[in-house]
Amino acid sequence: MLLDIRNLNIFAPTPQGEVQVLDRVNFRMEAGEIHTLVGESGSGKSLIARAIMGFVNPNWRVQADRLWFQGTDLLTLTPRQRKEIIGIDIAMIFQDPLRYLDPNTTVFEQLNEAILNRDINASYWQRKQARRDYARKLLLKMGIKNYQEVLASYPFELSDGVAQKVMIATAIAHRPHLLIADEPTTAMEPITRRQIYRLLAQLHARYQMSILLITQDLSTLMPETHRISTIYCGQMMESGPLADVLKRPFHPYTDALSYTSLLQTERLNPRDRLTTLPGLEPTLQHMPRGCRLGPRCPNAQRKCVIRPDLSAASKREYFCHYPINSEESES
């Protein structure tokens, strides 16, 4: 097991008191797996990634029965020990590369910082050239042919697509075991988006690198995805193999997401209405009791004011009192 999270809770202080941002989140990944985490904007999916990386606001309170990476409990590590793991075994790429790349240093200088000494097999006098050659190879793997120009450039001189490729190159410079991609193609053109996802697929195939892809749109799924998890308002809804979940979702929220994706809208006639959930997503200060989807769920009943326990069936996990398409719902 590469990543194992059990009952992850995150509490944030507000003027009205402490609010629970993540509510008993369960999540797991196997080594060499591509796992996609899907949810609306503000659902908490990026916060899960930040909890893994240790980037959560220090004023927020993080609790978990288990937050393990390769058998190591990340919550029990000192900041220095955790930094060693994050710096070598886990890397993250963000949705806005120009925000996270240093505008005051060149691309080569930033890649050079990410390259580990263990990957440079050269004498002291040849080390600088060896690092430049290593950086050049990283950009070539990203499909950047004008690598000399890019290496000498500052981030603000690059296009969004090239800047994102530079961020990916920086993240994989030390070949991490887990790569977290937080909506890496937001606001990008379709051609650039396909290039980025093709790069991620190649990294997975070449290095057997585990990838956690975070997105809010099922239409941007990587075909190579093994498992998918859906999250709503800080609560995990469903998790399972990609083909099974899309073909036969157990949770009403996953079912609604699938109908709003391109996989379903391509089958609609021009005048057909989209299937959507009624109502709006609640604010953090006014979260519903129990299942947070309750006020918008078409299957909600009185029992839904109680948080559903984890149910497992057919390699699937879900949190729902009244699931759809499952043996429980058909009995």
Image: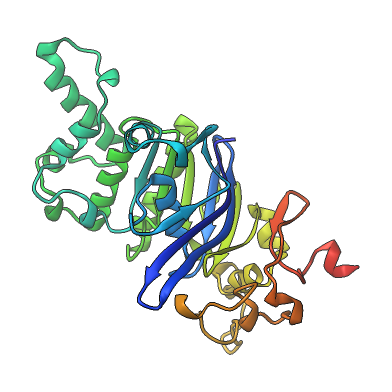
Q: Residue 305 or 324: which is nearer the viewer?
A: 305
Report the number of numbered marks: 0
Examine the image and state in which quarter residue 141 appears: top left
Q: Is residue 52 visible?
A: yes
Residue name at image x 24 percent, y 50 percent:
162
Q: Is residue 98 above or below residue 250?
A: above
Q: Where is residue 242 shown, x and y percent of the image?
A: 63, 53
Residue name at image x 13 percent, y 21 percent:
129
Q: Where is residue 294 shown, x and y percent of the image?
A: 65, 78
Examine the image and state in which quarter residue 184 appears: bottom left
In the orientation shown, which residue stands out farthest toward the right?
331
Left or right: 89 in relation to 317: left
Q: Is residue 283 visible?
A: no
Residue name at image x 75 percent, y 82 percent:
302
Q: Where is residue 85 shown, x and y percent of the image?
A: 39, 33
Q: Residue 69 or 13: which is nearer the viewer?
A: 13
In the orientation shown, which residue stands out farthest toward the top?
123
Residue name at image x 71 percent, y 66 percent:
308
In the orientation shown, which residue stands out farthest toward the bottom?
271
Q: Image quadrant for the N terminus?
A: top right
Q: Image quadrant for the C terminus?
A: bottom right
Q: Residue 307 or 210: which is nearer the viewer?
A: 307
